[in-house]
Amino acid sequence: MKHHKPVSPASLVTGLAAAAVVGMLAAGCGGGSQPKDVVLVTHDSFAVSKDVKQAFEKDTGLQLRILQGGDANETLNKALLTAGDPQGDVIFGIDDSILSRALDGDLLDEYRSPELSALEPDFSSPDSHVTPIDHGEVCLNVDRGWFASHDVPPPTSLADLALDRYRNLLVVENPATSSPGLAFVLATIATFGDRWETYWRGLRANGVMVVDGWEEAYTQQFSGAAGSPGKRPIVVSYASSPAAEVIFASKKPSTAPTAAVEEGCYRQVEYAGILRGAHNVDGARKLIDFMLSERFQADVPGSMFVYPVRSGVPLPEAFVKYAVVPKDPLQLSPQEIDANRDRWVARWTDIVVR
Amino acid sequence: MDRHRRTLSRTATAAVPIAFLALFFAWPLVAILRRSLVVDGRLDVPWGVVTSDLTREVLWFTLWQATVSTALTLAAGLPLAWALSRFRFRGRSVVEAFVLVPFVLPTVVVATAFIALLPDGVERSVWAILLAHVFFNVAVVVRVVGAFWAGLDRRLWDAAATLGASGAQRRLRLTLPLLAPALASAASIVFLFCFTSFGVIVILGGPRYATLETEIYNQAARLFDLRTAAVLGLIQLAAVAATVLVSGRLERRLGGARRGGQEAPRPAGRERIVVGAVVLCSVALLALPLLALVVRSLSVGDGYGFDHFTALAHETPALFVAPWHAVLNSLLFATAAAAIALAVGIPAAVAVAGGRRGLDVLLMLPLGASAAMLGFGFLLAFADPPLDLRSSPWIVPLAQSLVALPFVVRALVPALRAVDIRLREAAAVLGATPGQIRREIELPLLARPLAVAGGLAFAVALGEFGATVFVVRADWPTVPVAIFRFLGRPGEDNVGAAMALCVVLMGLVAAVALVSERVLVRGGPR
């Protein structure tokens, strides 16, 4: 073995400290007069195809950088924490149930994209601070194989879940910690009105399982997801989840192993907005316009398993075949949600978890 | 030696870790506390939180689950530490490497394996939490206690036996007191890990169980109630500081031990059976959940194959790069993090061993700070030039090294304290310069603890998730972050990719541990 002069800890530290300082300075000096990139702050579920991202970068000459920061709620909270001195230029992933918090927090600059006129009528006139990008429906999903082999008909409505034959079969997400979990509770409130608490007492008596997040509910407790060790055949997920089971299956099955229950689905719309204090406002506008373009909108189902808001955008084949687009999804107004959300979640926690 | 110079150099060694902690720990923490608790320029603490029922319940559960988990982990880890450190046998280094694997696996992954393995009634209960904590932390006991145990002079036991001490007497009156510093060290690390446990509680406990750490996260990141989170965060920090103080005092009272340089013997006679049984049982229990993961990574449709592994080469919508990039990123970040942790940790350990005890407490504090609070603090503190680190890749190894630092120090301090001062003095009398003493005497004696420290730091950085996910950029994912993103998507291919990456991570960790064991220890300076 060769004998090198041993490096003393002190000189190692000095070297590293110097390297760190250089790195920081280099990072700090990046902000020249003409920004070369645009930064999108978003949640962990955001995805975009490589060629679509490259198309944006080629068209605008801007590099698209993506910062992901937890689920939609956490991403919004981080943005609120740094409001006015934001981490990026555009935030994407604010859904209806948290929209009012973003608007009240003085977080966003106004922007009305010229592309808004091309959207479906349901979406074309939002608050001037936000732009709708996609919508997804939270629905019950069932494991078709389980119900076939147990000779039990799958549930067709929310009310069915309280029936004895569905005892210990349902897993839901905690509305305090999960966006689909909250959407599902909102669906039950929209359906049962004042009787929603009674309904949940019934579900608790019928053995509903509560977990913190969608990942755990769907990939670990739901028996219908591929490779899942789960034992429960009913889960709260999305209308598009059955299509995902087909698209991501290693051997494409002829029928989807799971199905969404069309009744009792709740619509979530996801919005984007320009962060107040953004370094690159012009790039931010270009990015929002691009997110409404035909190219990005057509990519949305395959990448994020949600539906486009632009009219006339074709859906991938698997979506047409296996996913349902619920006809009249449930929805509550952002104002109503905002006024009651905390109280509802606290009541729900008392009834179902405590 | 000039006393003045010595004092000066000792102050200098302590200055490095203190500056590091001040910049990357204290400053962000102060930033978030100020934002949470200072209203209109005045400190305004919601004291009601301290005495609320919620806090009492959460604190009680946090304490007792951490205490029980620590006791169980010590009980489970000590036999293996004994077998691995006191005997030489074929495959020992493989077993040592393997033990480290559970420790660095992301909690999401291990929890998945546990759910698959545990029977229905147990899978979401306190038992599942305790079991998972033992599974994760056995490595700490084996490594920290084992590294120390291996250096104890065997002749003491031979002498005690000659003098007529029975096996039980030797264990109780010789082994236990001698091991005490390392035991206190390991126990305090395990306790802190269980005390601040997050993923295990959330996934295996479900919404019914809350520790301080999960409640802080809940209040800060989800409910955005920063004031409540800040108070809970301070309670947690105080508890952690108290733990470290107590364990430090224990360690000192119990004192260090003389080192012997003998090679471990092969087990003989009845020992063979006991050592064999201990090693086989421990490995089997640790391997079970890991095997479940391997099986899931290989199951494709109704059969088996390597499809999920070959798929790692292709880009998917779940990541913004091909998954194998994550492996490169992880290696890169972990190397940088281990280098930083060693660079800061070596002077820190020297200072702590030389009597700077306050520093020891300080170094452990990052383990006790809530990742969510610290993450929020980073966002506030490093927002503007010249320290605009929020979107710089540098922030990842820095955050990881903060987590790895206590391991480096903990692995080094007992060994540093145990270097016989008379050896140094004798060398000095014989005319050796301080540099020569360091090189020719201390370094060879410390080679094994240094290798252990470096390997641990690297492995901890490889598996680090809580802090990394808070600061990492989407196009620079590490393996645990990539696993997390894949698990967040429906469909077999995504789950399969997550499981395949878990297996890759397991392999990486085992390889690193093997290499640090073989190259650094066996082939090191004689």
Image (cartoon, grey):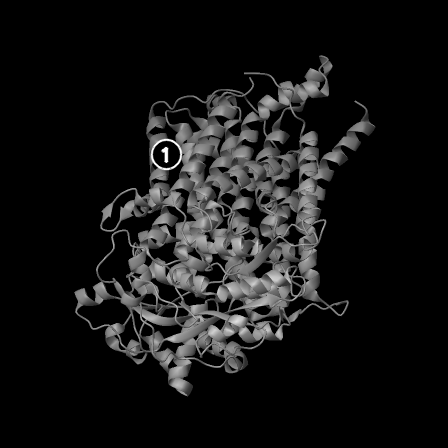
Subunit ID for the residue under disc 1: B
In-front residue for pair B473/B519: B473
**Is B179 on the left-hand or right-hand side of A150?**
right
Residue A115, x across and y down, in percent: 51, 71
In-front residue for pair A243/B332: A243
Tell me which amino acid carries mark 1. Answer: Val
Say whether residue B410 is visible: yes
Secondary structure under tag 1 reads helix
Name, please, the residue furthest toward the front: A59
Q: Quadrant of the N terminus of chain B?
A: top right
Residue A31, x across and y down, in percent: 68, 52
In-front residue for pair B106/B305: B305
Name, please, the residue furthest toward the top: B430
Say if A304 sits above or below B426 in the image: below
Residue B11 location, quadrant? top right
Residue B298 location, quadrant? top left
Residue B274, x across and y down, in percent: 35, 31
Say if B61 sits above or below A166 in the image: above
Say whether residue B221 is visible: no
Q: Quadrant of the C terminus of chain B?
A: top right
**Is B469 on the left-hand or right-hand side of A199?**
right
Q: Which residue is mark 1?
A: B279
Q: Sort mark 1 into few (<14), some (14-19) or many (20+) by Cα contacts within 10 Å.
A: some
Q: Residue at x 59, y 57 (%)?
A: A38
